[in-house]
Every structure is written in C-alpha cells, then in structure tokens.
Image: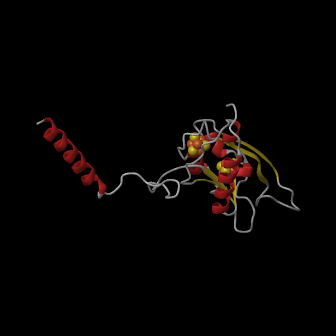
Amino acid sequence: MNVLRAAWGIVTGHMVTLKYLFKRKSTIDYPRVPYPHPERFRGVHELRKYDDGLERCIGCELCAVACPANAITVIGAENDPAAPTSPGQRYGYRYEIDMLRCIFCGWCEEACPTDAIVLTPRFDIADYTRERLVYGKDRLVVTDPFKQHLANTESAAKTEPGVI
Ligand code: SF4
Ligand code: SF4
C-alpha cells in the first residue's frame, strides 16, 4: 500500500513538472535578452549634443533648481568665442548627477530649455563605489548614445570591487 502511495506521489509530481514544461517562461535570459521596459520608463540620464558636435547644455542650472533630490550640480562658464563648447554665451563647465540621490522623476528633463538632459531606458547602473555613481560629463555627454552605453558598461566592468 505504501509502495503504491509513493508511486502515485512520483506520478503526480511529474505531472506538475510536465504541466509547466511547455508553458511560457515568466523569466528572461538577462543580460543576453534585454529587459522589456514599459514605454515611459525613466532611467539613467544623457547630456545630448547637436548634430554639429556642440553641446546642448548652456549651463543655466534650471535642471539643478528643479531637482527635488538635490542630485544635480551644474557650474556654468563663458564660452570661448574661438572654440565654443555650446551655442550661445555659456556652457556647462561642470555637470554632475549623483545617481544615489536621483529618484528618476524626470523633472530635470522637463525643466531643460534646450533638451540637453534626457532620461533613457538604461537602468543597469550597479557599481562598486559611491564615488563612481556620481556621473560627470565624461559619462553623461553623448554623441552616439549606443557607443556611450558600451563605454559606460565596459568601464564599470573594469572597476575592481572596493570598500564603499
Ligand atoms: S530625475 Fe529627478 S531626481 Fe533625478 S536628477 Fe532629474 S530631477 Fe533630480
Ligand atoms: S541640462 Fe539643460 S537645464 Fe540643465 S544646465 Fe544644461 S541647459 Fe540648463
């Protein structure tokens, strides 16, 4: 009797396995398969350029004022007329976003008069130190968004684990 009961237990167990074997998987093969974002997902920022290579940011600080988390630091400077960084008088000399403070609300994007700061669908910002999560212009300014994404990913992969 016990043997029959044990055998029935094995059969019912396998029936459950078979039932789920052919169902659609609820997991994905990340990172080989990109995570499907909702259409309006807001992730890591980019500072965009114009097609002629000039930076869109004019250092006006409106994004920093709008930021409810005090995550943005902007220091503007006068453009060199002989070799301007952006159109107009001023440009963003220093631009930093502290990703640990950011709540990805998108207010900086709303406030920007030149569409310079844009939130992208990128979310993979894990890193080993707090310092590396303060993004400067070297990681935010983008000419080719795809190349910048690769550069950020490779640079994060090279970072040695450290004390936070
Ligand atoms: S998304 Fe929101 S919290 Fe993050 S930097 Fe922009 S304004 Fe600040
Ligand atoms: S990103 Fe936009 S709002 Fe922020 S300083 Fe530059 S131009 Fe001004």
Seen in the image, is 21 located left or right of residue 6? right
Residue at left 59%, top 39%? 102
Residue 104 x/y as whole percent: 54, 44
Residue farthest toward the right in the current orientation of the protein = 82
Can residue 90 be seen in this snapshot? Answer: yes
Give the quarter of the figure containing the C terminus: top right
Give the quarter of the figure containing the N terminus: top left
Seen in the image, is 35 located left or right of residue 78? left
86 or 40, nearer to the observer = 40
Residue 155 x/y as whole percent: 70, 50
Residue 134 x/y as whole percent: 68, 40
Residue farthest toward the bottom in the current orientation of the protein = 52
63 or 30, nearer to the observer = 30
Seen in the image, is 48 located left or right of residue 54? left
Residue at left 24%, top 53%? 19
Can residue 114 be seen in this snapshot? Answer: no
The total of numbered circles placed on residues is 0
Q: Residue 132 falls in which quadrant of the image?
A: top right
Residue farthest toward the top in the current orientation of the protein = 163
Residue 130 x/y as whole percent: 67, 35
147 or 66, nearer to the observer = 147
Rendered-image quarter of ligand 1 = top right
Q: Residue 146, relative to residue 109: is it above or below? A: below
Residue at left 61%, top 50%? 45
